[in-house]
Image (tube, grey):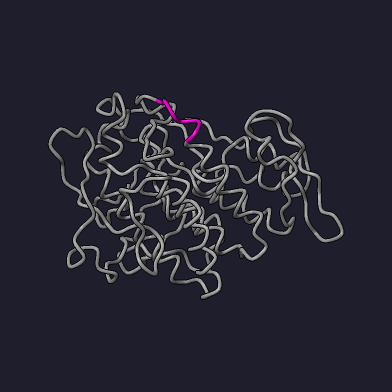
């Protein structure tokens, strides 16, 4: 959940240090209490895997996945890789490394989902930034309901919610991350914003999430009442991170957002004008919906472009820092 300042921000026991004073408004992983103490200190989930894949070392299958651990709400949760999913990293670890033009290629696949991207080329120099962005972009499975194609939604394994269409929802992320990696005009800084932005689009709005079977049984029960508030906070963080990018990077971010938006195939959702993300949504309960959240705010209300997130982006952020920052509202405080 987003940080609270003052006395409520005090940590105890094995938690990471309390958050700085309200004057220090920038996100820092070491103060992110949705991370374990070791994750916060390292500022990463799987930095060893990022290093291994980047340098051409082999990894075990599924090594990018981060294990479940206890939260302060009394349950344990694993992590959803909300941009670069585990099997995508497995594929990248088996790439054919750079030719004379500096382009590497994914392995040849004759069956399964990855047949679609068999032999796909991408700039080798862009790989580490993409891996870092993917490492930071993670949400708790206990509170993840994904956007699926054609306006659908699907619970994530570990959410307690029906997982039909989960595979198709992950396919949208696979396609998006490979598109961005393959774009030679994407800077490392833009990769982090794209990873966070993709996450926000991929977390289903409350109205959509409520339609999924067993939505009322979401494992992180408290997330049902803060659902759209958390999505709004993440949207504001995307905007602030986006504003720090040069104009040319902003154009690439918006282009890749357009690609993902089209892949959703949902005519009930809309993009903001001239900025990434969608307008903010109403946060209250809706009759008959298990998960809070309503329609987009009217133009004259809280969707004002002057509204700020509770924390500003990290200073001189790496792709991983940016992704951690944007996705923090979708994780739960750790013990």
Task: Give the x, y percent position of residue 316.
Answer: 53, 68
On the image, the x and y values in percent for residue 242 come to 45, 66
Instruction: Name the residue at 51% across, 44% down.
Output: 39
Residue 97 pos. (x, y %): 81, 49
Of 236 and 321, nearer the camera is 236
Q: Residue at x 21, y 50 (%)?
A: 295
Q: Residue furthest right?
A: 100
Q: Position of residue 67 (x, y in %)?
A: 52, 31
**The residue positioned farthest toward the left in the image shown:** 287
Image point (50%, 69%), residue name: 250
Residue at screen point 37% across, 28% down: 159
Residue furthest bottom as drawn: 247
Give the residues drawn in magenta, as a range: 163-168
Magenta stretch contains residue 32? no
Q: Quadrant of residue 205?
A: top left
Of the pair 4 and 111, the residue shown nearer to us: 111
Q: How many marks?
A: 0
């Amino acid at each position: 959940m987003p940080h609270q300042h003052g006395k409520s921000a005090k940590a105890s026991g094995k938690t990471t240090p309390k958050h700085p004073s309200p004057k220090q408004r920038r996100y820092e992983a070491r103060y992110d209490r949705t991370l374990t103490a070791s994750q916060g200190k390292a500022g990463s989930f799987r930095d060893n895997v990022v290093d291994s894949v980047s340098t051409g070392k082999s990894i075990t299958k599924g090594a990018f996945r981060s294990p479940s651990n206890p939260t302060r709400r009394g349950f344990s949760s694993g992590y959803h890789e909300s941009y670069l999913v585990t099997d995508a990293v497995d594929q990248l670890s088996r790439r054919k490394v750079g030719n004379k033009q500096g382009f590497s290629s994914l392995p040849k696949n004759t069956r399964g989902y990855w047949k679609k991207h068999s032999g796909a080329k991408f700039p080798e120099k862009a790989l580490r930034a993409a891996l870092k962005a993917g490492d930071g972009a993670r949400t708790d499975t206990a509170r993840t309901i994904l956007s699926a194609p054609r306006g659908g939604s699907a619970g994530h394994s570990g959410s307690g919610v029906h997982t039909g269409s989960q595979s198709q929802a992950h396919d949208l992320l696979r396609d998006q991350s490979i598109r961005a990696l393959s774009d030679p005009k994407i800077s490392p800084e833009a990769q982090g914003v794209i990873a966070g932005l993709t996450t926000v689009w991929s977390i289903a709005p409350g109205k959509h999430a409520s339609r999924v079977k067993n939505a009322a049984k979401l494992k992180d029960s408290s997330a049902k009442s803060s659902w759209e508030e958390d999505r709004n906070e993440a949207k504001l963080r995307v905007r602030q991170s986006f504003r720090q990018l040069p104009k040319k990077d902003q154009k690439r971010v918006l282009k890749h957002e357009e690609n993902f938006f089209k892949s959703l195939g949902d005519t009930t959702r809309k993009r903001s004008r001239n900025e990434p993300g969608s307008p903010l949504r109403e946060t209250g309960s809706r009759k008959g919906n298990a998960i809070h959240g309503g329609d987009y705010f009217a133009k004259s209300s809280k969707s004002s472009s002057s509204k700020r997130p509770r924390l500003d982006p990290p200073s001189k952020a790496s792709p991983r820092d940016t992704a951690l920052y944007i996705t923090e509202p979708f994780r739960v405080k750790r013990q």
